[in-house]
Amino acid sequence: MSKATTKKIVFYDTDKRHANLKIRLHYDGLTQTSFFRNMISGYLDKDPAIIDFIQRFKELNNIQSAKKREGSKRLIEEGEKTKAKYSLLEDEEVENIFDMIEKEFPEL
């Protein structure tokens, strides 16, 4: 993990769901930490599988209006098209470029 300040994320659930989670994670060879960090990364990075899951969750639980959900979905799709159209760099690619510049010109 980077040198950035870290925050602890805590939430409560039932003993049964916690036990079931631990069993499933063990079956899949995952730790709780890796599972939650990767799920959060997928959500923040707008992974299509995660976004589809969230959209279904919002629809099933009547979170946001249908119009708002459709608008959000359309904006995400338009953003992906724009990114592909202009071949925009990912955050990691930008960071790699800055690392190369720093190696080449350490005095900057």
Image (cartoon, rainbow, N blue to C red):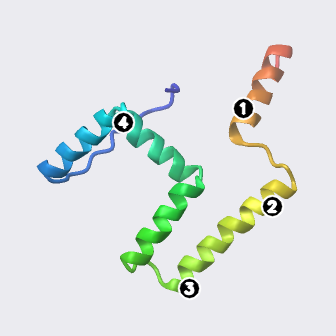
- Which numbered disc, 2 or 1, marks the residue that appears first in the sequence? 2
Question: Relative to residue 7, is residue 65 depicted above or below?
Answer: below
| Residue at 61% across, 71% down | 73
At numbered mark 3, what does the secondary structure look like: helix, strand or loop?
Answer: helix
What amino acid type is highlighted by mark number 1?
A: Glu
Question: Relative to residue 43, is residue 77 depicted above or below?
Answer: below
Question: Circle 4 sits on which residue?
Answer: 28
- Which numbered disc, 1 or 4, marks the residue that appears first in the sequence? 4
Compute the Cα span from label 2 to label 1. 21 Å
Question: Circle 3 sits on which residue?
Answer: 67
Using the image, tell me which numbered label, if any, was put on residue 82.
Answer: 2
- Which numbered disc, 2 or 3, marks the residue that appears first in the sequence? 3
Closest to the camera, between mark 2 and mark 1, is: 2
Question: Circle 1 sits on which residue?
Answer: 95
At numbered mark 4, what does the secondary structure look like: helix, strand or loop?
Answer: helix
| Residue at 79% across, 19% down | 102
The answer to the question of whether label 4 and label 3 lie on touching residues, with beta carbons closer than 8 A, is no
Question: Relative to residue 45, is residue 105 depicted above or below?
Answer: above
What amino acid type is highlighted by mark number 3?
A: Lys
- Which numbered disc, 4 or 3, marks the residue that appears first in the sequence? 4
Side of 48 where 24 appears, left or right: left
Quadrant of the image containing the C terminus? top right
